[in-house]
Amino acid sequence: MTTSVDQYNSGADGKKPVPSPEEYALKKHVDFFDRNNDGIIYPWETYQGFRAIGAGIALSAFAAVFINAGLSAKTRLGKGFSISLPIETANIKFAKHGSDSDVYDSEGRFVPSKFEAIFVKHARTSPDFLTSAELQELLKANREPKDYIGWVAAWVEWKVLYLLAKDRTGVLRKEAVRGVYDGSLFDRLEREKASGKKKAACRV
Ligand code: HEM
Ligand SMILES: [Ca+2]
């Protein structure tokens, strides 16, 4: 009898593959922005996703251009540049950059020990959150020499996260950071914004 990996990785009906929570963490991170669930994120979807979680018009427009222009070709595997800047979510692992926290491995899976390491190393005020200054230290510590693109990408990711997800006391809570890695934070922020709980997360 032959057994395939697919057999072990099947759902109750024996057909649908069931990804483990860790397996496609990076895909989940970006799926929120695929507003019509067709596997492709166009700039207008990045814009709408940012608006939905409380970002202002300027930041959302900047993100739509910066993210889609930066990542589109990397996810199109040999198809090259397209003027409509589509990001193919199935290939999002190819959009990884350097100078990050390594919490996503090369396959886009969530690595719990690297996540914990962020807080062991940098959460000095309290193990439950990062202050703005501690975040700055994390960014500096993650920098690989001369990886300027990675420095900018990581800076934007973490600063935008801080801007949108800091709590009332101005700190970035561990659970918020955990939620960014599987995208659940984005769903929460969208719900909060829709219910009027969170008014202006950011005016930019
Ligand atoms: C408000 C929206 C977003 C925030 C706050 C955010 C924040 C982050 C953070 C904090 C990381 C982890 C970096 C690290 O581990 O050091 C990350 C990783 C990543 N994000 Fe986002 N992100 C957002 C939207 C997006 C969008 C729209 C895309 C693409 C469609 C995207 C693509 C990625 C990729 C590819 C990585 C992996 C980087 C790597 O491991 O090298 N993100 N993001
Ligand atoms: Ca889409």
Image (cartoon, helix red, strand yellow):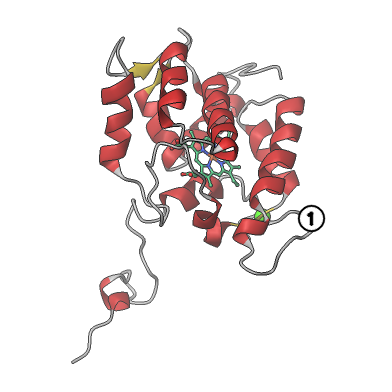
Q: Which three-letter amino acid code belongs to the residue tagged 1?
A: Ser
Q: Residue at x 42, y 43 (%)?
A: 182
Closer to us: 117 or 30: 117
Q: Answer yes or no: is residue 98 visible.
A: yes
Above/below status of 35 relative to 133: below
In the picture, which quadrant includes the N terminus? bottom left
For this view, does 120 lie left or right of residue 52?
Answer: left
Q: Answer yes or no: is residue 191 visible.
A: no
Residue 11: % across, % down? 33, 69
| Quadrant in the picture for residue 194 | top right
Q: Residue at x 32, y 76 (%)?
A: 6
Q: Quadrant of ligand 2?
A: bottom right
Residue at the left extreme of this rendering? 1
The residue where tag 1 is placed is 84
Residue 89: % across, % down? 57, 57
Disc 1 under 8 Å from ligand 2? The reply is no
Above/below status of 134 relative to 50: above
For this view, does 117 lie left or right of residue 51?
Answer: left
Q: Residue at x 36, y 27 (%)?
A: 175
Closer to us: 177 or 117: 117
Residue at the front extreme of this rendering? 146
Q: Residue at x 28, y 41 (%)?
A: 112
| Quadrant in the picture for residue 181 | top left
Mark 1, other Cα within 10 Å: few <14 / some 14–19 / many ≥20: few
In the picture, which quadrant includes the C terminus? top right
Residue at the top extreme of this rendering? 169
